[in-house]
Image: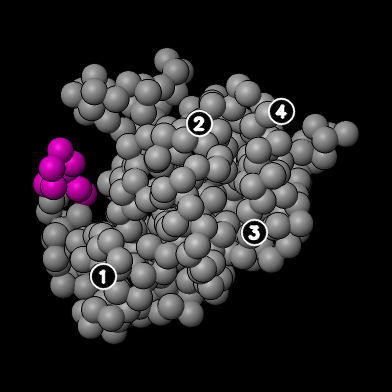
Amino acid sequence: MRTLLLGLILLSFGPFSIAYGQTQSFRAGVARIEVQAATPFEALIWYPTQADEVSWQTGPFLVPATHDAQPAAGNFPVVLLSHGGGLTGGSPLLLKELSASLARQGFIVVAPFHGTAGLFVRPFQVQLALAAMLDTPRFAMHADPTRLGMVGFSLGGAVTLKLAGAIQDEAHFAAHCVAHPEDVMSCNNAPSGRRPGAPSPGPLTRERETPLPPHLALKAVVLLDPLAALFPRDGLRAVTMPVLLIRPKQSKLSGEGNADTLALTLPVPPLYQRISGGHFVFADPCTPSQKTASPEVCLDPSDVDRVAVHAGVESMVTKFLAEKLQ
């Protein structure tokens, strides 16, 4: 029955087709700002500009946007972005192509560097990064926070769900990990190197003493192969905004308990799309040196063209957010 229901959800949306008004095309600008917090962190702000686009080199990353360009005239919707975690903590620079694509289509993207912060801290980082962007005059005069959306990848999907109003359940997650020992990516791949829901002294205890962040007034949400096993059906009742859910067919993140289950348990059925590739197909195409250093993140099955997959995902995400945040 579960498989049948999921099939009906997929079939009901069929190939991705959505009314989409034409958006003005810009070039991508990017800035790196400091965010004040108990532990300060940085965030990337991507935004539309009319300046010539000149790639910016930061560390090993060649960023397809002009650093500190003058923002274009206009008033633009805001998209928050929460990157994945993994043992290293992840980075928004792995999603730079998607962020630049959104900026070129008239969105301001706020993407914090989460570092190795756990799930309890990351929603606060997103909230603080949004506030810091709105406190920066050159962005505040162009940002419309009433048209607010969010994109979350992997652990960032759980962050996004929490900010959308979802309530996690530690016992529910523990039961998932017991029932699915093969789901290593969900249960044993947190930035701290432990299960996200496992009791331990130190950072998790301190995180539990932190008050829950207020829900943000998100108008639309995009979930890229999200970690969702933390949330039972009852914990998702408040997530009633439009959701675009995308899952790679060869992902090692279990669909059971995560994307497939989420498609059936969200109170409003999401637009659910399947794409080619593994979990990390959402990360930007890698250079040869990156492929050698991080084969799990960079290498795809022989029949997967990551560049083509990215073009399709960028189109889906842009069209969805353009309609929902208009």
Residue type marked 1:
Gln
Q: Which label is found at residue 55?
A: none
Residue position marked by numbered label 1 in the rendering: 36
Secondary structure of the residue carrying numbered label 1: loop
Q: With 173 as the anchor, is 277 left or right in this view?
A: left
Q: Position of residue 75 (x, y in %)?
A: 35, 80
Q: Give whichever of discs 3 and 1 has the lower sequence position.
A: 1
Q: Position of residue 98 (x, y in %)?
A: 36, 49
Q: Give whichever of discs 3 and 2 has the lower sequence position.
A: 3
Q: Check contact, mark 4 vs mark 1: CB within 8 A.
A: no
Residue type marked 2:
Asn
Cα distance in 3D space between marks 4 and 2: 14 Å
Vertical placement of 7 versus 321: above or below? Answer: above
Of residues 205 and 319, which is closer to you in this image?
Answer: 205
Cα distance in 3D space between marks 1 and 2: 30 Å
Residue farthest toward the front in the current orientation of the protein = 201
Residues drawn in magenta: 57-64
Residue position marked by numbered label 4 in the rendering: 179
Residue position marked by numbered label 2 in the rendering: 188
Q: Check contact, mark 1 vs mark 2: CB within 8 A.
A: no
Of residues 256 and 103, which is closer to you in this image?
Answer: 256
Q: With 190 as the anchor, is 69 left or right in this view?
A: left
Vertical placement of 170 versus 32: above or below? Answer: above
